[in-house]
Image (cartoon, rainbow, N blue to C red):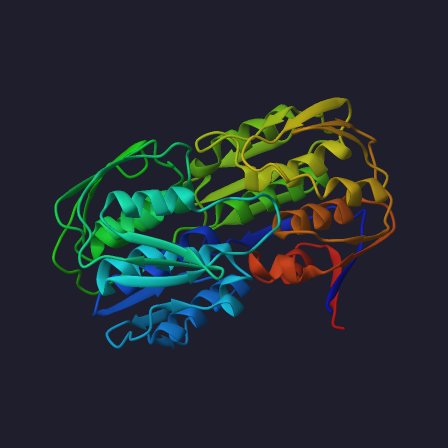
């Protein structure tokens, strides 16, 4: 099993290109199931989760062609299988996103109950209630969800809780439903808007994406088209924190800093200098970081996918800070690993009190989920001595060539294959 070895204490300086967004490409790949025509997608990140979603589409009968620029052409005209099996779905919760498109276009779907990172229950009941409201018959048995409908009907659906994948799944389903669907209390994340923009380019009629209310007027069919995936704001934010934690000077290119206003504000409060352009952001780390309070919230609030990284930053800052997680109930599993590096953290329910130590000391640690992996990489970069991170297969799910990108800006980091 691969591991990452870091010898910390080096200031990171230079430029890092940002990849396409994992959280955008997965629903957009699923959306190709809605049309018989070819869809070309660009700015695809080379990630394990993307590979899994492509395998799942192939399982359904789609043909995928990768070009020399790592763009992907998806042809779902020969889809003949509506089963999403356990062996694929168990590794990635986003697999549930094929349910809405399969039911909308093929009238049925059988989806294994999803897996992915063990950061909370993340139930799919909101997806199922929405499909039921649109006329689907739902059955749960043997670890699978079965949904059937001759044609979905437009409905007025109010989400009990803000759900990104729920918003995406039902928005996709509604594109081919009969009549108008109104989704209320929707997720406003940029990835939801990117999915809507892709669907609109294929002929869908969608209004309001990026707000709490989305209107979809169903059409008979979608056509083909092309779409470039938006930049990964979580990867961008992770490298922004790396600059701050190492006292470095990093410029992230090919990104959109407007998607990270809440995270940028916290970096500035911590003492970092942040400069922004249309498609780049530069972070200069201070001599002494200040601890900052963090509370995760749905977009445009502070993103839960950056909580672990900022918690790591607080560990090497001066002062004490509270980090409160409101999205997932089990997203402090990285705390015990940070404590192995010398961090002073006390967890009480959904809040972690961090007392900055100014420095950390290298040690062997184990990644527990995707963002915890990134958090431990950041901690290792800032720590004195050597940090060995085990179970790094998690990080390959969401970060493209992270050790190569960090090595290019001065990090002493290597992957050990085992």
- Residue at point 48% right, 29% down? 301
Along the horizontal axis of the image, is 158 left or right of 237? left
Q: Is residue 353 above or below residue 135?
A: above
Q: Nearer the viewer, residue 280 or 109?
A: 109
Provide residue 133's location: percent of width, then percent of height: 26, 42
Q: Nearer the viewer, residue 249 or 166?
A: 166
Q: Is residue 148 visible?
A: yes
- Residue at point 42% right, 44% down? 125
Along the horizontal axis of the image, is 5 left or right of 72? right
Q: Is residue 279 above or below residue 147?
A: above
Provide residue 378's location: percent of width, then percent of height: 71, 46
Number of numbered callouts drawn: 0
Quarter holding the N terminus? bottom right
- Residue at point 82% right, 36% down? 343
Displayed quadrant of residue 84: bottom left
Displayed quadrant of residue 69: bottom left
Along the horizontal axis of the image, is 10 left or right of 184? right
Displayed quadrant of residue 294: top right
- Residue at point 56% right, 62% down? 91
Quarter holding the C terminus? bottom right
Q: Is residue 70 visible?
A: no
Q: Is residue 412 above or below residue 37?
A: above
Provide residue 385's location: percent of width, then percent of height: 87, 50
Provide residue 310's location: percent of width, then percent of height: 65, 36
């Amino acid at each position: 099993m691969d591991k990452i070895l870091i010898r910390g204490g080096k200031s990171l300086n230079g430029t890092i290109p940002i990849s396409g967004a994992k959280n955008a490409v997965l629903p957009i790949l699923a959306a190709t199931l809605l049309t018989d025509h070819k869809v070309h997608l660009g700015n695809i990140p080379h990630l394990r989760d993307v590979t899994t979603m492509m395998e799942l589409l192939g399982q359904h009968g789609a043909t995928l062609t990768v070009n020399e620029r790592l763009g992907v052409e998806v042809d779902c005209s020969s889809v003949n299988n509506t089963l999403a099996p356990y062996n694929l779905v168990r590794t990635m919760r986003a697999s549930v996103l094929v349910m809405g498109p399969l039911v909308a276009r093929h009238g049925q779907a059988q989806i294994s109950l999803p897996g992915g990172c063990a950061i909370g229950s993340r139930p799919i009941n909101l997806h199922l209630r929405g499909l039921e409201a649109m006329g689907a018959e739902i059955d749960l048995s043997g670890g699978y969800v079965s949904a059937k409908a001759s044609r979905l009907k437009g409905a007025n659906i109010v989400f009990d809780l803000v759900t990104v994948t729920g918003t995406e799944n039902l928005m996709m389903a509604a594109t081919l439903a009969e009549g108008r669907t109104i989704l209320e209390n929707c997720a406003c994340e940029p990835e939801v808007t990117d999915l809507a923009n892709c669907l609109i380019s294929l002929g869908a009629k969608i209004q309001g994406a990026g707000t709490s209310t989305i209107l979809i007027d169903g059409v008979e069919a979608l056509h083909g088209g092309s779409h470039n995936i938006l930049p990964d704001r979580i990867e961008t934010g992770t490298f922004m924190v790396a600059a701050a934690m190492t006292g470095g000077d990093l410029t992230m290119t090919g990104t959109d800093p407007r998607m990270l206003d809440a995270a940028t504000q916290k970096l500035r409060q911590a003492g970092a200098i942040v400069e922004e352009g249309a498609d780049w952001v530069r972070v200069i780390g201070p001599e002494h970081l200040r601890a900052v309070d963090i509370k995760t919230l749905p977009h445009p609030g502070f993103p839960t996918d950056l909580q672990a990284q900022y918690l790591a930053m607080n560990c090497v800052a001066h002062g004490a800070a509270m980090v409160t997680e409101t999205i997932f109930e089990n997203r402090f599993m990285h705390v015990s690993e940070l404590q192995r590096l010398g961090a002073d953290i006390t967890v009480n329910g959904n809040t972690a009190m961090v007392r900055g130590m100014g420095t950390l000391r290298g040690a062997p640690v184990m990644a527990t989920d995707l963002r915890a992996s990134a958090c431990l990489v950041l901690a290792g970069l800032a720590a004195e001595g050597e940090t060995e991170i085990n179970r790094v297969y998690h990080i390959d799910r969401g970060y493209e060539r992270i050790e190569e990108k960090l090595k290019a800006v001065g990090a002493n980091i290597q992957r050990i294959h085992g």
